[in-house]
Image: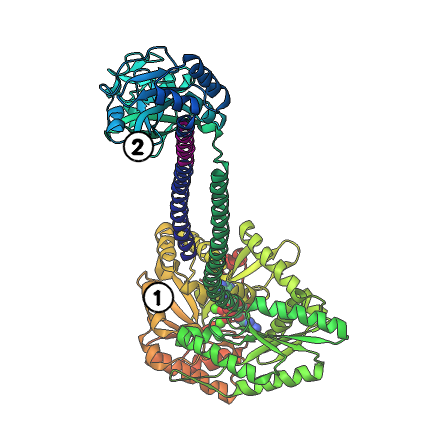
Amino acid sequence: MNRGFRVFLVGFILLAIIFSFSYIYTTQRVDDLKAKKYLEISKEMRNDLELLIREKSEAVLLVCLTLSEDKIVKKIIRTKQYSKLALNNLSSLLQKYTSLDNVWFQIIDDNGVSVYRSWTSQKGDNVASIRLDVAKMIRLPKVMSTISVGKFDLTFKAMVPMSNKYGRFIGMIETLAKFNSLVAKLESKGYETLIVVDKQYKKQLTRSSSGIFINGYYIANPHSNEHIFNILKKRNVNYFTEIDGYKIDERNGYIFTLVKVDGMDNRPMAYFIISKPLSEIDISEIYQTRDNIIKTLVLIFFFLLLFLYIIYNVNYKRFIQQQNEILEYAVEEKTEELQKQSKKMKYLAHHDALTALPNKNLFLDRLKQGIKHAKREHQSLAVLFLDLDRFKEVNDTYGHDVGDELLKNIAIRLLACVREDDTVARIGGDEFTVLLPNANQVSVIKVIEKIFDVMRKPFLLLGVEIHTTFSVGVSVYKQDGENPDILLRNADTAMYKAKDSGKNTYQFYNEKMTELVRKRLELDADIRNGLRKGEFEAYYQPKIDATTLRIVGLEALIRWKHPTKGLLYPIEFIPFAEEIGLIVEIDRYMLEHCVKQLVEWRAVGYNTGKLSINISTKKLESEDFRSELYQLVEKSRVDTKFLELEILESQIMKDPERSIDILRSIRSLGISIAIDDFGTGYSSLSYLKKLPVSQLKIDRSFVMEIPEDEDDAAIVKTIIDLARNLELETIAEGVETEGQVEFLVQAGCHNIQGFYYSKALSKVDCEAFMKKYS
Ligand code: C2E
Ligand code: CA
Ligand code: CA
């Protein structure tokens, strides 16, 4: 829950509390107002009644006073001569001309004897003995105006004393009036009034008018007000007599108020229960006020709510904005990281890890762009394909660490030879490429010469000094191709041509080269095919002891009976087979084939001497060579003392320690080892001593010019002496003349191989030769 929302919630709750209190207050206030209104109305009701009572009392008194001045009355009381007729007239006049209904009068003399009663003919009785007020008047004549309860009912009563002309008290006149007219008057004002006389008067009301008592209370006017009378009947009279101010009867819909009249003894005498239907009291104003207040409150509430909402919204927006900012920042950071990572990945994907130069992909991409540009600008473009000469030797001789260092240093030197716009890439082990935009033949040659120049300086790496050179092929857009792959391939082809023509050279591509490549590919497939079909054959060149003219051995030399090209010599396929590794298969083929032949020949008794088989370095170094040899020997049951392997001096000396190991295991099988082409491979004497070899084959190049060439003659002699000292046999190869034979024999080498005795022979021819020379 965010801060904005919390503020909003707290605000809402506070508002709701305030609103609730306001509502309660308002409702209470309405009740107060209602109470006030009721109080006012009840007061008004009471006032009205009290006014009427006073008016009536006064009226009754006035009538009494008027009567006291009346001549007839005066005469009657003075003379005590009663004229009934005159009085009755007076009485009816009174009834007729006053506003008072039911008004009566009585004349009482100074002894308290009732002289005349207008409502009955009874007279002559002494009332002073039963009425305190009359006795009081006789004792102390004084105008009196009271409300009292008599035998009949509750009445207004006024008494006025009368005197003669001497001022002596002679009697009194009393007027009486009932309350009924009062009730009628109140009714015209909308009140209904019930007159109830206190229960202490029950006994006195011996001749009550209505005759209705409830709980001892006398109900003076039950029929003028049935409603209230019925309520009274249901409820206790006390319910009304105890009213203080007003009472609301919600059930029946009335407001009640009470006017209490005390008697002369100050005890309650009569009760006027005044009522008015609630429906006639207009309190709509109050409700309207209340409604207005509530409306205003609701309005304020919603307004504040809106205000809060706006504040909340602003806050919330700010909060969201903050969150967004945080999120944005995080996303930005992550994106940056990813970008960095992808940059790194991109870099790795497009660069060579060792030299940090662009890799093949990037080079091809640049080449593509370069071609586009060249096309647009009608320019040319050159691709240089550089291949290190003898890099493998460096690796084999000094190890991969040195090899890696060499590549790194070469990269640095190459970069120094080109312009900024040019691209130098490493696309393979020891293969580099250079892209030269807008270059012509002259500028290309300049760059190449610059490269050759920087490469002349030896590299000093991890304590060893290394000389290395490049063979470079060049292809040019657009004469040599119009797309990256073709240009690169053609530069590669040109590079091969450069390699063929003697390394540390460069070669511009021409179409004939493609033809060469095509031929190589064909050759590859052809060799494999030939091996499968057994198109290869061994020819055997005899080795002769010049002193005895007997065969001392045979060298197996491979020939290819090609189905379309005829008989092919090793020079036409062995170098290529070495290059692409197929030589391993060829050597295995020859080993199996020749061992089988040897076993056969020995079985039938041919004097073969030692049969020697040429083994390439690749074969020698191949992992399974030893086991292959063991298996072959075991399987064929060949007599290994007639078996010899020829290994090139240059190959053995590459890694003499390792060679010693392999050669020992060959030797342990009883197989002899001859060092081929001896004299060309810079043998180290110390190693020569350790190697388990039995024969040195003096290379043909030294034999060719002897005895004429003194240098060669000296070399040959030296080799022969060396071999004798090391207790090794020697054999000279490529011997073609008698002079050569003579020289060699004299020098101490009587084993001769060469055309002088025989070229390499087919199986059949060799068998004939063996028969002849054994
Ligand atoms: P290499 O081992 O030095 O074999 C001797 C080569 O000298 C053979 O050529 C042979 O015919 C030739 N030769 C012998 N006497 C004379 C001579 O008096 N005058 C001249 N001009 N040449 C003579 P070839 O058979 O063409 O073999 C060439 C090379 O091919 C061999 O040189 C050997 O290195 C390789 N080679 C031949 N057969 C095999 C093979 O089965 N396996 C392997 N790995 N290499 C083989
Ligand atoms: Ca050989
Ligand atoms: Ca040789």
Q: Where, by quadrant of the figure, is residue 230 drawn?
A: top left
Against 727, residue 465 (above or below) is below
Question: Which x, y percent locates residue 596?
Answer: 44, 53
Against 286, residue 740 (above or below) is below
Q: Is residue 466 left or right of residue 496?
A: left
Q: Which residues are magenta?
A: 41-60
Q: Nearer the viewer, residue 576 or 686?
A: 576
First in residue order: circle 2 vs circle 1: 2
Q: Nearer the viewer, residue 408 or 87?
A: 87
Question: Which x, y percent locates residue 593?
Answer: 47, 54
Q: Nearer the viewer, residue 418 or 763?
A: 418
Numbered disc 1: secondary structure: helix
Label 2, on which residue? 142
Label 1, on which residue? 662
Magenta run includes residue 268: no
Against 12, residue 128 (above or below) is above
- Can residue 538 be seen at all in this image of the molecule? yes
Q: Amino acid at mark 1?
A: Ile
Numbered disc 2: secondary structure: loop
- Can residue 757 be seen at all in this image of the molecule? no
